[in-house]
Every structure is written in structure tokens, then in C-alpha cells.
Amino acid sequence: MMPNPITESLEARIAAAVQAVRQPRPKQVRPIVIIGAGGIVRAAHLPAYEKAGFPVIGLMDQDGK
């Protein structure tokens, strides 16, 4: 199967645009406290905060288990 040059060109342009966009950052980073430590927090929120460089200082699960 031959690669589609239109698709490759579009994907390259999208990748270049994503890298060129400057992500907004807060002027003052405040620590994050999370209430509820379910699967979505562990699988998505915490890794995203770590990748963005945001400090998480508290994590509390309301079930207390």
C-alpha cells in the first residue's frame, strides 16, 4: 500500500502547529490538592500534573480506605 502524500503532509503540518503553540502557564503556580483518588486521578490527572510541572501537595480519598 502506497503512503498518501496528502495525509502525510497534513499530519506533518498538524505536528508542527502543535509544537509551535505556546502552552498557557499561570503567573503563579499554586499547589494542587485532590479530593477523591479514583482511577481517573491515578491514570490521567496525576501524570498530567507531573508532566506540566504542577505540584500536588495533597491527595485525599473520601472513602478513607
Image (tube, rainbow, N blue to C red):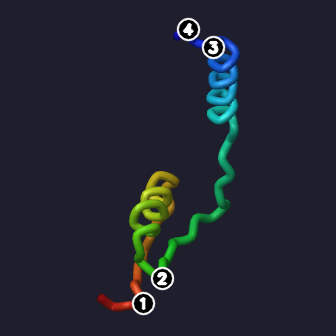
Secondary structure beneath disc 2?
strand
> Could you give the CA–CA distance between mark 4 and mark 3, rounded to whole angstroms?
6 Å
42 to 6, vertically: above or below: below
Residue 18 percent coordinates (x, y): 65, 35
Under circle 4, the secondary element is: loop
What SS does tag 1 mark? loop
**What type is the residue that disc 2 sits on?**
Ile
Residue under label 1 = 62
Q: Which mark is residue 4?
A: 3
Please tell me how crowded label 2 is: few (under 14), some (14-19), or many (20+) other residues with Cα within 10 Å: few
Q: Identity of the amino acid at label 3?
A: Asn
Which mark sits nearer the N-terminus, 3 or 2? 3
Within 10 Å of disc 3 (Cα), the crowding (few <14, some 14-19, many 20+) is: few
Residue on which disc 4 sits: 2
Disc with the residue nearer the chain's start (2 vs 4): 4
- Coordinates of residue 39 in the picture (x, y in percent): 40, 69
| Residue at the spot 49% in from the left edge and 57% down from the top edge | 48
Residues 38 and 34: in front is 38
From the image, tell me which residue sits under label 2. Answer: 35
Q: Do tag 1 and tag 4 residues touch (Cβ < 8 Å)?
A: no
The image position of residue 34, as x and y in percent, is: 48, 77
Q: How packed is label 4: few (under 14 Cα within 10 Å), some, or many (20 or more)?
A: few
Q: Which comes sooner in the sequence, label 3 or label 1? A: 3
Q: Nearer the viewer, mark 1 or mark 4?
A: 4
